Amino acid sequence: NAKGFREHGRRWAECILATFFPGVPTNAVRGASPGMSLLSPQPGHVAQRDAQNCADVPVSGNFEGALSRIEGRWTPMPGGDPSPWTLVADAPQDGYFSGKLPMTTGWYRLEFRGLKDGRPVAARTVERVGVGEVFVVIGGDSVANFGQSRQEAKDPRVSSYCTVCYERPMRDPLRGAIGDKGTSWPALGDALAGAFDVPVEIVVCGYSGAIAQWKPGTPMYNGGIMSTLFYSRRFATGGYRAILWEVGEMDAKLGVKADDFVGAMTSIVTQVSKEVGWQAPWVIAGVAYHPEAAETNRLAIREAQKRVCDGKILFEGPTADDLTGPVWRYDGIHFTEAGLQEHGKRWATVLLKLFLGEKR
């Protein structure tokens, strides 16, 4: 914890001073005065809103010295009156604290303060923390690899998250892409934020491949899906609106049978629900186009994608299989900038209809 890090560093400093700088007294290494550092939320963090347009924003961090209480408050952005100070942690122990701030839909500037004997002695501020819509993206070979041009969300309310880059403005490159250019997700975020005037965060989980590469026990399952949804502790129950699944092009190329695709998809959804501890909706994109795939193979994958959607937990997503030719795919497989923009807008259209049918 924070206290242990400080003490361990102090002991190293004493040793180095005594060994290499014998003229400097070791009592120059003093303990820290009270202070705080924040682990969560980071700038750009978006918490998934509920049906009442509210969310609990998770707060955690480390402190040094002795603090009796940690409080937080929020101010709407771009302006407004701050909320009253709200208790985050009472009598935190061992240099670590965690709690939550209940907030309503919007962007906020957050302030935190640590108190000792009723007096503020430490403070931290976080800009751009939101309550809105969060979507997890899994797959997307044609939109996440080797695109011709980097994309960036134009709407400042759109952010992204991954277990490597954490929160930041929505822009390429994104974790999981083989290349560093070209994804549809900034366009998706722009369309959603513009339609509903709320913060939007897109969580990119990994690039595409055949569905067998995503099955439980594989590196892409453990290092992609689970590292994002479970191991990172980023998402509590209800922490995102839906998982957007875009896998199928390679399965068509490889000739995967429809029954095998359905079986693999079912096992993935079942295991994710079991490990994460709650059932989130999945939206299954209708993607099976690959220039090297036989037409019968494409039809088999499209059939499997339709068959697996039950309208309860798994829903039909957009298709981009009609976006072919040089206008949409610069190398026959991966999208041009026009293709990326169109694909992102199609995703937004489906999600607005499925989950956000009326502004709230």
Image (cartoon, rainbow, N blue to C red):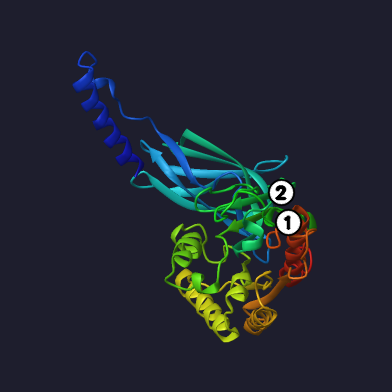
- For the point 57% across and 62% down, the residue is 239
**Residue 203 occupies quadrant:** bottom right
Q: CA distance from mark 2 to mark 1?
A: 22 Å
The structure residue drawn at horizontal position 70% and vertical position 42%, both measured from the top left corner, is: 77
96 or 222, nearer to the observer: 222
Q: Which mark identifies residue 221?
A: none
The circle drawn on residue 153 is 2
Q: Earlier in the sequence, mark 2 or mark 1?
A: 2
Tell me where residue 17 appears, x and y as whole percent. Answer: 24, 22
Q: According to the image, label 1 marks what residue?
A: 330
Q: Is residue 254 left or right of residue 67?
A: right
Q: How many C-alpha atoms fall within 10 Å of the one at disc 1: few (<14), some, or many (≥20)?
A: some
The residue under the point 62% across, 69% down is 245
Q: Quadrant of residue 261?
A: bottom right
Q: Secondary structure at mark 2?
A: loop
The kind of secondary structure element at disc 1 is: loop
